[in-house]
Image: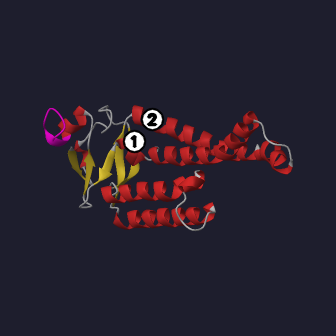
Amino acid sequence: MVVVPAQPGDRISVCSRHGNPVTCTASARFRSRPPVWLQAAVVVIVVAFGLPVAYPEARYLDDPDPELYLLILGAGLFAAWLTHNIMVKIIDVPAWGFCPACQARRANLVTAATVCLVLVPVSCALWVPVVLPEQLGDDELSTLAEIVRWAVVVAPAVFAIAGVVLSAYARWAVVAGGVAGRDGTTVEFRRPAAQFAQQVTGQAGPAE
Protein backbone atom coordinates (compact mmCIF):
# COMPACT_ATOMS: atom_id res chain seq x y z
CA MET A 1 0.00 0.00 0.00
CA VAL A 2 1.14 3.54 -0.79
CA VAL A 3 0.05 6.46 1.40
CA VAL A 4 0.11 9.96 -0.08
CA PRO A 5 -0.58 13.29 1.66
CA ALA A 6 -3.91 14.83 0.77
CA GLN A 7 -2.04 17.65 -0.98
CA PRO A 8 0.88 15.90 -2.70
CA GLY A 9 2.18 18.99 -4.46
CA ASP A 10 3.99 19.15 -7.80
CA ARG A 11 6.50 16.34 -7.19
CA ILE A 12 4.17 13.67 -8.62
CA SER A 13 4.31 13.81 -12.42
CA VAL A 14 2.69 10.43 -13.26
CA CYS A 15 -0.84 9.18 -12.70
CA SER A 16 -1.53 6.78 -9.87
CA ARG A 17 -3.38 4.12 -11.88
CA HIS A 18 -1.28 3.74 -15.06
CA GLY A 19 2.02 5.44 -14.28
CA ASN A 20 1.77 7.57 -17.42
CA PRO A 21 2.81 11.25 -17.50
CA VAL A 22 0.13 13.57 -16.20
CA THR A 23 -1.57 15.61 -18.93
CA CYS A 24 -4.51 17.09 -17.02
CA THR A 25 -5.78 17.68 -13.51
CA ALA A 26 -9.27 17.38 -12.07
CA SER A 27 -10.95 17.81 -8.72
CA ALA A 28 -11.19 14.45 -6.94
CA ARG A 29 -13.17 13.60 -3.82
CA PHE A 30 -11.65 10.60 -2.06
CA ARG A 31 -13.82 8.65 0.39
CA SER A 32 -12.75 6.11 2.98
CA ARG A 33 -13.85 2.49 2.71
CA PRO A 34 -16.90 1.43 4.74
CA PRO A 35 -16.15 -0.69 7.81
CA VAL A 36 -16.25 -4.46 7.32
CA TRP A 37 -19.00 -4.86 9.91
CA LEU A 38 -21.20 -2.42 7.98
CA GLN A 39 -20.71 -4.36 4.73
CA ALA A 40 -21.61 -7.59 6.56
CA ALA A 41 -24.71 -5.93 8.03
CA VAL A 42 -25.90 -4.90 4.55
CA VAL A 43 -25.51 -8.48 3.30
CA VAL A 44 -27.50 -9.82 6.26
CA ILE A 45 -30.27 -7.25 5.75
CA VAL A 46 -30.56 -7.99 2.01
CA VAL A 47 -30.64 -11.76 2.53
CA ALA A 48 -32.95 -11.68 5.57
CA PHE A 49 -35.55 -9.30 4.16
CA GLY A 50 -34.95 -9.36 0.40
CA LEU A 51 -35.07 -13.11 -0.13
CA PRO A 52 -38.58 -13.56 1.36
CA VAL A 53 -39.94 -11.07 -1.18
CA ALA A 54 -39.04 -13.34 -4.09
CA TYR A 55 -39.61 -16.66 -2.30
CA PRO A 56 -42.83 -16.79 -0.24
CA GLU A 57 -41.74 -20.04 1.44
CA ALA A 58 -38.84 -18.14 3.00
CA ARG A 59 -41.13 -15.72 4.84
CA TYR A 60 -40.80 -16.13 8.57
CA LEU A 61 -42.88 -13.19 9.86
CA ASP A 62 -46.58 -13.37 10.66
CA ASP A 63 -47.55 -11.04 7.81
CA PRO A 64 -47.44 -13.12 4.61
CA ASP A 65 -47.41 -10.10 2.29
CA PRO A 66 -44.08 -8.86 0.92
CA GLU A 67 -44.78 -5.21 1.75
CA LEU A 68 -43.56 -5.62 5.34
CA TYR A 69 -40.30 -7.21 4.18
CA LEU A 70 -39.78 -4.44 1.63
CA LEU A 71 -40.42 -1.83 4.32
CA ILE A 72 -37.89 -3.39 6.70
CA LEU A 73 -35.42 -3.87 3.84
CA GLY A 74 -35.70 -0.22 2.82
CA ALA A 75 -35.41 1.00 6.41
CA GLY A 76 -32.37 -1.20 7.01
CA LEU A 77 -30.59 -0.07 3.85
CA PHE A 78 -31.36 3.57 4.65
CA ALA A 79 -29.93 3.14 8.15
CA ALA A 80 -26.80 1.53 6.68
CA TRP A 81 -26.44 4.36 4.15
CA LEU A 82 -26.86 6.95 6.91
CA THR A 83 -24.30 5.18 9.12
CA HIS A 84 -21.83 5.03 6.24
CA ASN A 85 -22.19 8.75 5.51
CA ILE A 86 -21.62 9.58 9.16
CA MET A 87 -18.52 7.40 9.49
CA VAL A 88 -16.92 8.03 6.10
CA LYS A 89 -13.93 10.33 5.77
CA ILE A 90 -13.87 12.69 2.79
CA ILE A 91 -10.81 14.37 1.29
CA ASP A 92 -11.19 16.89 -1.52
CA VAL A 93 -8.14 17.35 -3.75
CA PRO A 94 -8.68 20.28 -6.14
CA ALA A 95 -6.07 19.22 -8.72
CA TRP A 96 -5.20 15.51 -8.95
CA GLY A 97 -3.18 14.44 -11.97
CA PHE A 98 -4.52 12.12 -14.69
CA CYS A 99 -3.21 10.73 -17.97
CA PRO A 100 -5.02 10.20 -21.31
CA ALA A 101 -5.73 6.57 -20.34
CA CYS A 102 -7.48 7.79 -17.17
CA GLN A 103 -9.56 10.22 -19.22
CA ALA A 104 -10.53 7.47 -21.67
CA ARG A 105 -11.44 5.13 -18.80
CA ARG A 106 -13.70 7.73 -17.24
CA ALA A 107 -15.28 8.65 -20.59
CA ASN A 108 -16.14 4.99 -21.26
CA LEU A 109 -17.70 4.62 -17.81
CA VAL A 110 -19.72 7.82 -18.22
CA THR A 111 -20.97 6.63 -21.61
CA ALA A 112 -21.96 3.21 -20.25
CA ALA A 113 -23.73 4.78 -17.25
CA THR A 114 -25.60 7.19 -19.53
CA VAL A 115 -26.77 4.34 -21.78
CA CYS A 116 -28.03 2.35 -18.78
CA LEU A 117 -29.91 5.33 -17.32
CA VAL A 118 -31.47 6.11 -20.72
CA LEU A 119 -32.63 2.50 -20.98
CA VAL A 120 -34.57 2.82 -17.70
CA PRO A 121 -37.47 4.86 -19.17
CA VAL A 122 -37.21 2.92 -22.44
CA SER A 123 -37.73 -0.39 -20.63
CA CYS A 124 -40.49 1.16 -18.53
CA ALA A 125 -42.29 2.12 -21.75
CA LEU A 126 -42.49 -1.59 -22.63
CA TRP A 127 -44.83 -2.09 -19.68
CA VAL A 128 -47.74 -0.72 -21.73
CA PRO A 129 -47.55 -3.15 -24.69
CA VAL A 130 -46.19 -6.14 -22.71
CA VAL A 131 -47.21 -6.10 -19.04
CA LEU A 132 -50.50 -4.19 -19.06
CA PRO A 133 -52.36 -6.43 -21.57
CA GLU A 134 -51.27 -9.51 -19.64
CA GLN A 135 -52.55 -8.03 -16.38
CA LEU A 136 -55.90 -7.04 -17.92
CA GLY A 137 -56.44 -10.35 -19.70
CA ASP A 138 -57.98 -13.41 -18.11
CA ASP A 139 -56.01 -16.00 -20.08
CA GLU A 140 -53.26 -17.95 -18.38
CA LEU A 141 -49.81 -16.84 -19.43
CA SER A 142 -47.57 -19.15 -21.40
CA THR A 143 -44.06 -19.84 -20.15
CA LEU A 144 -42.51 -17.57 -22.77
CA ALA A 145 -44.97 -14.78 -22.02
CA GLU A 146 -44.23 -15.10 -18.29
CA ILE A 147 -40.50 -14.87 -18.94
CA VAL A 148 -40.94 -11.81 -21.16
CA ARG A 149 -43.22 -10.16 -18.61
CA TRP A 150 -40.77 -10.68 -15.76
CA ALA A 151 -37.88 -9.49 -17.93
CA VAL A 152 -39.73 -6.28 -18.68
CA VAL A 153 -40.60 -5.80 -15.00
CA VAL A 154 -37.05 -6.40 -13.77
CA ALA A 155 -35.21 -4.57 -16.58
CA PRO A 156 -35.73 -0.99 -15.29
CA ALA A 157 -34.32 -1.91 -11.88
CA VAL A 158 -31.34 -3.70 -13.45
CA PHE A 159 -30.55 -0.76 -15.73
CA ALA A 160 -30.99 1.73 -12.88
CA ILE A 161 -28.66 -0.20 -10.56
CA ALA A 162 -26.09 -0.63 -13.35
CA GLY A 163 -26.25 3.08 -14.15
CA VAL A 164 -25.73 4.09 -10.52
CA VAL A 165 -22.82 1.66 -10.07
CA LEU A 166 -21.13 2.77 -13.29
CA SER A 167 -21.62 6.41 -12.31
CA ALA A 168 -19.90 5.72 -8.99
CA TYR A 169 -16.95 4.07 -10.77
CA ALA A 170 -16.73 7.05 -13.13
CA ARG A 171 -15.81 9.41 -10.30
CA TRP A 172 -12.31 10.86 -10.65
CA ALA A 173 -11.27 9.51 -7.25
CA VAL A 174 -12.22 5.95 -8.27
CA VAL A 175 -10.42 6.37 -11.60
CA ALA A 176 -7.33 7.38 -9.64
CA GLY A 177 -7.69 4.22 -7.55
CA GLY A 178 -7.36 5.81 -4.12
CA VAL A 179 -9.41 6.06 -0.95
CA ALA A 180 -9.27 8.47 1.94
CA GLY A 181 -7.31 7.33 4.98
CA ARG A 182 -8.98 6.93 8.34
CA ASP A 183 -7.04 9.93 9.67
CA GLY A 184 -8.61 12.19 7.05
CA THR A 185 -5.26 13.66 5.95
CA THR A 186 -3.90 11.03 3.56
CA VAL A 187 -4.96 9.12 0.46
CA GLU A 188 -4.28 5.37 0.29
CA PHE A 189 -3.53 3.34 -2.85
CA ARG A 190 -3.54 -0.45 -2.62
CA ARG A 191 -2.29 -1.26 -6.12
CA PRO A 192 -0.79 1.90 -7.63
CA ALA A 193 1.38 1.96 -10.73
CA ALA A 194 5.04 1.20 -10.03
CA GLN A 195 6.15 4.58 -11.41
CA PHE A 196 3.74 6.38 -9.10
CA ALA A 197 4.86 4.36 -6.08
CA GLN A 198 8.49 5.05 -6.92
CA GLN A 199 7.94 8.80 -7.02
CA VAL A 200 6.01 8.74 -3.76
CA THR A 201 8.17 6.35 -1.73
CA GLY A 202 11.50 6.45 -3.54
CA GLN A 203 11.36 2.66 -3.91
CA ALA A 204 11.08 0.38 -6.92
CA GLY A 205 7.52 -0.67 -6.12
CA PRO A 206 4.58 -0.13 -3.79
CA ALA A 207 5.30 -0.06 -0.10
CA GLU A 208 3.93 -3.01 1.86
- Whether residue 25 appears in this view of the structure is no
Q: Main secondary structure of the magenta part?
A: loop
- Whether residue 125 appears in this view of the structure is yes
* Mark 2 residue crowding within 10 angstroms, few (<14) / some (14–19) / many (20+): some
Q: Residue furthest left?
A: 203
Q: Is residue 167 left or right of residue 34?
A: right
Give, as a single range, the part of the protein colored magenta.
200-208
Mark 1 residue element: helix
In the image, residue 204 lies in the stretch drawn in magenta: yes
The residue under label 2 is 105
Look at label 1 and name its amino acid. Answer: Val
Give whichever of 176, 135 is nearer the camera.
135
Residue 78's mark?
none
Q: Residue at x 60, y 41 (%)?
A: 116
Q: Quadrant of residue 145?
A: top right
Q: Position of residue 34 (x, y in %)?
A: 34, 57
Residue 175's mark?
1
In the image, residue 153 lies in the stretch drawn in magenta: no
In the rendered structure, which disc, 2 or 1, sits on the residue that comes first in sequence? 2
Q: Position of residue 15 (x, y in %)?
A: 31, 38
Give whichever of 8, 78 is nearer the camera.
78
Q: Quadrant of residue 150?
A: top right
Look at label 2 and name its amino acid. Answer: Arg
